[in-house]
């Protein structure tokens, strides 16, 4: 597509439920990144994909967080048993040879 | 995770004023990037710097890559209302994109006072 597409744009979930966030990168971009942005904070790295492999998953905060990428394209970030501290904007970016293009993010609110 | 130290945290200026913000790191980066984020959107790249000492301009924006490779600054001249937003610096160890994560600064929120 023309840009990085993320869905849903907003998600409100109850504490303890699982959520799935989706990222559709720019066509042909082999690298895909997930970042988390808490209110008023900078971007915190979560995981990076090169193709379908994840060379760096060092930013995943706990084993409740996982991500996968299939067909070198769409990626899903899954958060199990959500907690209130998981509330944040989850941003996806993709990259080819120059720079990174970010999506508009998914705002997750855990109540 | 690590974040770069960015200052000031917020700025309140009048339209037409010049703006300066900077970013420092305890470790070396070989690429420095500056992004702007509008409400409800992802960050958008403004300027990329690849060489220590490099000074690069993009319209009213000028950014420099510090000689020590541990800092960078961004200047905005003659600010206009659409400059309002949050500015982030970001560092990367390599000069190639798509091979590693970016480390982001804590952000500078720019507000223009009417």
Image: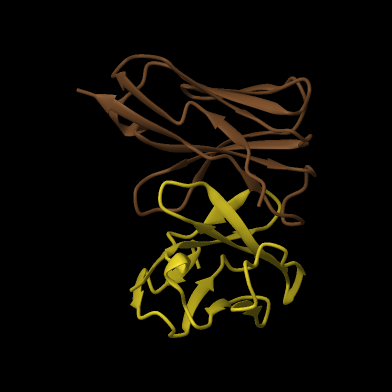
Q: Is residue A45 above or below residue B111?
A: below
Query: x, y percentage for residue A12?
Result: 33, 75
Colour brown belongs to chain: B
Q: Is residue A75 left or right of residue A14?
A: right
Closer to the camera, A101 or A57? Answer: A57
Residue at the spot x=74%, y=33% of the render? B26
Q: Is residue B52 above or below residue A95?
A: above
Residue at the spot x=59%, y=23% of the render? B73
Query: x, y percentage for residue A79?
Result: 53, 78
Residue A11: name its quadrant: bottom left
Colour yellow belongs to chain: A
Closer to the camera, B41 or B26? Answer: B26
Residue reaching furthest to the left: B114
Q: Is residue A54 left or right of residue A5?
A: right
Residue A107: name its quadrant: bottom left
Query: x, y percentage for residue B46?
Result: 53, 36
Closer to the camera, B24 or B51? Answer: B24
């Amino acid at each position: 597509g023309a840009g990085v597409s993320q869905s849903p744009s907003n998600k409100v979930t109850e504490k303890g439920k699982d959520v799935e966030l989706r990222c559709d990168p720019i066509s042909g971009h082999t690298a895909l990144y997930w970042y988390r942005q808490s209110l008023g904070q900078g971007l915190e790295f979560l995981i990076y994909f090169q193709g379908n492999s994840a060379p760096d998953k060092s930013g995943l905060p706990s084993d409740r967080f996982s991500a996968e990428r299939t067909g070198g394209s769409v990626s899903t970030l899954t958060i199990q048993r959500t907690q209130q501290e998981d509330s944040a904007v989850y941003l996806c970016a993709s990259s080819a040879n120059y720079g990174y293009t970010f999506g508009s993010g998914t705002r997750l609110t855990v109540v | 995770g690590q974040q770069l130290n960015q200052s000031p945290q917020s700025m309140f200026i009048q339209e037409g004023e010049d703006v300066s913000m900077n970013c420092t790191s305890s470790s070396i980066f070989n690429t420095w990037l500056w992004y702007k984020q509008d409400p409800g959107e992802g960050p958008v790249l403004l300027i990329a710097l690849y060489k220590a000492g490099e000074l690069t301009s993009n319209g009213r924006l000028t950014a420099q890559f510090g000689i020590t490779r541990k800092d960078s600054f961004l200047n905005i001249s003659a600010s206009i209302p659409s400059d309002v937003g949050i500015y982030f610096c970001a560092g990367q160890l390599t000069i190639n994109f798509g091979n590693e994560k970016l480390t982001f600064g804590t952000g500078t929120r720019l507000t223009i006072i009417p």
